[in-house]
Image (cartoon, grey):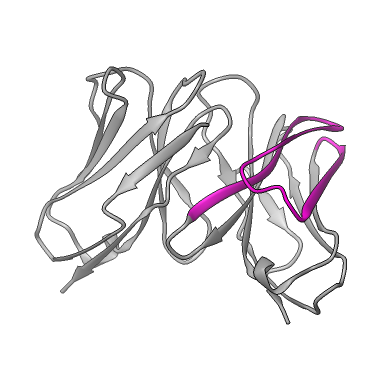
């Protein structure tokens, strides 16, 4: 089975802290994605990566950065956490090319106080 | 700007009812439309639709795509309480998701 693992299920951080959310997949997928999910807003794409060291901005990249140094790992970084970044964060991965389903991690519920 | 829009945002029905969930999209380089079900945790894959007019079916769930009018529907017949979830659609490629439809099925 494909496994996408997010390092933490729950995190509480203080305003201004630098926060790292880690995501690892074990299926040699080319593409990886970071979303945040808020009630009524669905999944909004923050960043995605289609190859090692490659990244593309999604719809809401402000306040976030990403790192993909190895194919299996995609990190989301909140440079200076703010309370409006309190959310559920979901990581996903897919094979490259067309017609591929996404596999999701279990999500990280981040609270910024 | 690419976008995927779902309607309704939420829906409450009784067991046994039939529901239709809608998903419209405007996406460059569109390839496929995917439906997911999300209960408490990660979304789980339901269907991938690539061709117009061909219905995909799994038990009481079915879905169809109209590439001319740029929309898809997900039907659930004889709903059960276990169908209560958020239903998400996404356009393949950049994987843009809609806002989701929150379905609640009452016993």
Queried whether the magenta region covers residue B9, the answer comes back as no
State the predominant SS element of the stretch in magenta.
Answer: strand
Horizontally, residue A67 falls left or right of residue B48, namely right
Q: Is A50 or B69 nearer to us in this picture?
A: B69
Horizontally, residue B10 falls left or right of residue B31, namely left
Figure quadrant of residue B33: top left
Queried whether the magenta region covers residue A48, the answer comes back as yes
Q: How many marks?
A: 0
Q: Position of residue A65 (x, y in %)?
A: 81, 49
Horizontally, residue B30 falls left or right of residue A76, namely left
Q: Is residue B58 visible?
A: no
Q: Is B59 or A90 nearer to us in this picture?
A: A90
Q: Residue at x 58, y 43 (%)?
A: A103
Q: Residue at x 66, y 42 (%)?
A: A33
Q: Which residues are magenta?
A: A42-71
Figure quadrant of residue B46: top left
Q: Is B49 or A49 nearer to us in this picture?
A: A49
Q: Is A97 or B96 nearer to us in this picture?
A: B96
Q: Position of residue A4 (x, y in %)?
A: 67, 49
Figure quadrant of residue B104: bottom left
Q: Position of residue B57 (x, y in %)?
A: 24, 34
Horizontally, residue A45 falls left or right of residue B101, namely right
Q: Is residue A91 shown above or below A54?
A: below
User: Which quarter of the figure is the C terminus of chain B placed in?
Assistant: bottom left
Q: As drawn, which residue projects farthest toward the bottom?
A: A113
Q: Is residue B37 visible?
A: yes
Q: Residue at x 80, y 76 (%)?
A: A15
């Amino acid at each position: 089975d494909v496994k996408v693992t997010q390092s933490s299920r729950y995190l509480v951080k203080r305003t201004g802290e630098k926060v790292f959310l880690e995501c690892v997949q074990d299926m040699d997928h080319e593409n990886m994605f970071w979303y945040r999910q808020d009630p009524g807003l669905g999944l909004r794409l923050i960043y995605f990566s289609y190859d090692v060291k490659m990244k593309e901005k999604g719809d809401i990249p402000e306040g976030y950065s990403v790192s993909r140094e190895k194919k299996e790992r995609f990190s989301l970084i909140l440079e200076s956490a703010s309370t409006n970044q309190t959310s559920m964060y979901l990581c996903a991965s897919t094979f490259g090319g067309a017609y591929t389903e996404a596999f999701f991690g279990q999500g990280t519920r981040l609270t910024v106080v | 700007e690419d976008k995927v829009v779902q309607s309704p945002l939420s829906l409450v029905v009784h067991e046994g009812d039939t529901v239709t969930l809608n998903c419209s999209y405007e996406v460059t380089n569109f390839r496929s439309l995917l439906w997911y079900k999300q209960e408490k945790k990660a979304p789980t894959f339901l269907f991938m639709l690539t061709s117009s007019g061909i219905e995909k079916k799994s038990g009481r769930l079915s879905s169809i795509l109209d590439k001319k009018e740029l929309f898809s529907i997900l039907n659930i017949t004889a709903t059960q309480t276990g169908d209560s979830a958020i239903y998400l659609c996404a356009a393949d490629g950049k994987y843009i998701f809609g806002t989701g439809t929150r379905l609640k099925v009452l016993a």
